[in-house]
Image (cartoon, grey):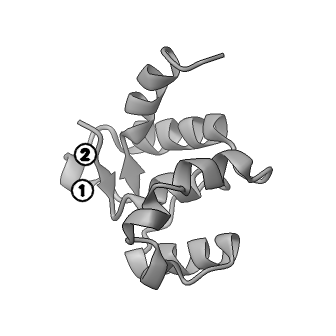
Amino acid sequence: MAYSNDSFELWFLLHYQFIESQLTRVHYYQKLSELWSCNYEQEGKKQVFCKQIFHRLEADSRADIYRAIRNARKLFEKQSDLLPADQNPSTKVYELVEELLKYSRK
């Protein structure tokens, strides 16, 4: 199960930095707006934008998928004794991404 608390946007931000403070999704939207020079709250959920997020992260020299995996794992391990609903911030998306990377073009 690849959950994210408080929101999926945590996974995107972990590409840039380690975050262990409990933030609301509004804070995540603000941070992504700054990083991506857009209004994420208005644009971020539109289908055309969503289809470009992977490429946006891949093209951004400040973002790193392996950093995101390390950051997400560290967050999860710090809270692994808690129920998933109480793990905030936390994301298990890294497990899915690690599996997908095994099959990616190298």
Image x and y of residue 40, in percent: 51, 78
Q: Secondary structure at mark 1?
A: helix
The residues tagged by marks 1 and 2 sit, at their Cα atoms, a distance apart of: 6 Å
Q: Residue at x 36, y 40 (%)?
A: 92
**Nearer the observer, 3 or 33:** 33
Label 1 close to label 2 by CB (< 8 Å): yes
**Residue at point 45% right, 35% down?**
94
Residue visible at 49% across and 72% down in the picture: 28
Residue 58 is left or right of residue 39, and the answer is right
Q: Which residue is mark 1?
A: 86
Check the image and report above or below for 15 versus 96: below
Image location (x, y in percent) of residue 74: 52, 39
Residue type of the residue flagged with mark 2? Leu
- For the C terminus, the quadrant is top right
Near mark 2 (Cα within 10 A), the count class, few <14, some 14-19 or many ≥20, is few
Which amino acid, by three-letter code, is at mark 1?
A: Asp
Considering the image in quadrants, where does the N terminus appear?
Answer: top left
Q: Which residue is mark 2?
A: 82
x and y, in percent, of residue 53 in the image: 53, 56
